[in-house]
Amino acid sequence: MTGIVIPDGGTIGSASDTDAIAISSSGAVTLSSDLIPATPLSHRNMIINGGMNVSQRYGTGSASLSGSNIGDYTVDRFALIVGSSYNLDTTSTQVSGDPNETGQSKALKIKCDTLQNPSATHNGGVFTKLEGQDLQRLLYGTASAKNSVLTFWAKAGGSGAGQYSCQIKYLKSGPTYYVQYHTFTLTTSWQKFTINLNANGTATSQPIIDDNTAGMEIYWWLVAGSSDLVSASSTWTTGDSSYKAVTGQTNFMADNSNEFYLTGVQLELGSVATPFEHRSYGDELARCQRYYNTHPDGSMNMHGFYYSSATSLAEVNFPVTMRAAPALVALNGAGSTSTDVTSIMGFTRAFSDAVGNFIDSYTADAEL
């Protein structure tokens, strides 16, 4: 017996028939579509907060973000990105994800605030980064390298319809980047976009870096200058850290009525996209707190003690172990920022403060 094939409803044995299920003689089962369409299996999605549910910095409020800072975060794990000091003057908001359309209750909305025409090397968009150690399941650089598929929902508002670009980069030690460039065309209606990422196992010198730094970066470009436009490419090619979009890129910043909406972002193994993996809010929040967490004013129950005439000591436990030692900003009861903070990944050990002004809020940032 060489195997069992179950057709998909066509005429058995006909040239047009497509196998729905195939069982090989070794017991391997191959399906042409989802294994359990209504009940997705867990831990498939490598993206954190792809449903845009967690927004620790701004809640449901708006964040007016402009200037050339890399890493102005909007909802957790998704940040604005610019190149060559471009002024991406926008307002970002966590909004309804139109669940009847997208299956998501939340979405990220980015609105153009000021018209900006890009020069040759200007870029602006939104991105997310993934730790290399969380991507080892892809097995890049080995004969067993796996295909993967990126899916997301997006739409335009105002006059923002047009062609946009998705740049995916992964990093191996060196540093050397491998890059793909894809396009997607927005309308004012929600659409689900699927990008298949082929396995990169042609050379053992191309594995994804295996540590807590960024192993993969995914960019949705909203604007790009003429010097940073390239041809679309669906295969991994050697590149660098440059920001590039695809020729034909729309200038999102050409009209201050333009809006960009994004939600339902998922990266998973395989060549066939499965339904979005919905995680509980608590699970998603804990994943986000590895990179950033905050305790607002009055929420902390902390004990400290007098150390000297200018210093009080206290210990603040973070809710989860952070990715790295965070940049920590602590505020005392008088609203003053502490000037001497010593922190490690699990808790803060000491900070200086005026005697009697206890620390009652903090933010801890260990973003990639």
Image: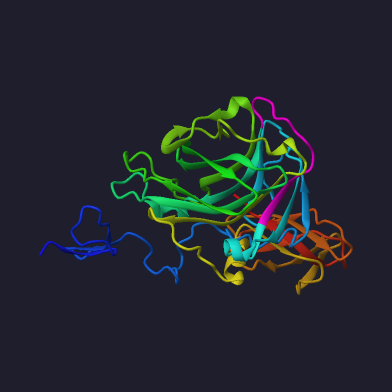
Q: Quadrant of residue 348?
A: bottom right
In the rendered image, residue 205 lying in the magenta stretch gets the answer no
Residue 194 placed where, x, y %?
48, 50
**Direction from residue 192 to residue 149 in the image, left or right:** left
Q: Which residue shows up at 41% across the image and 51% down it? A: 148
Residue 204 placed where, x, y %?
32, 41
Q: Is 88 placed above or below 295 here?
A: above
**Direction from residue 328 to residue 193 in the image, left or right:** left
Q: Main secondary structure of the magenta part?
A: loop
For the record, the magenta segment spans 108-122
Q: Which residue shows up at 38% across the image and 40% down it? A: 206
Residue 266 placed where, x, y %?
51, 56
Q: Which residue shows up at 56% across the image and 49% down it? A: 129
In the rendered image, residue 119 lying in the magenta stretch gets the answer yes
**Nearer to us in this view, 188 or 182:** 188
Query: How is the structure coloured here?
Result: rainbow
Q: Quadrant of residue 296?
A: bottom right
Residue 328 placed where, x, y %?
71, 56
**Direction from residue 46 to residue 355 in the image, left or right:** right
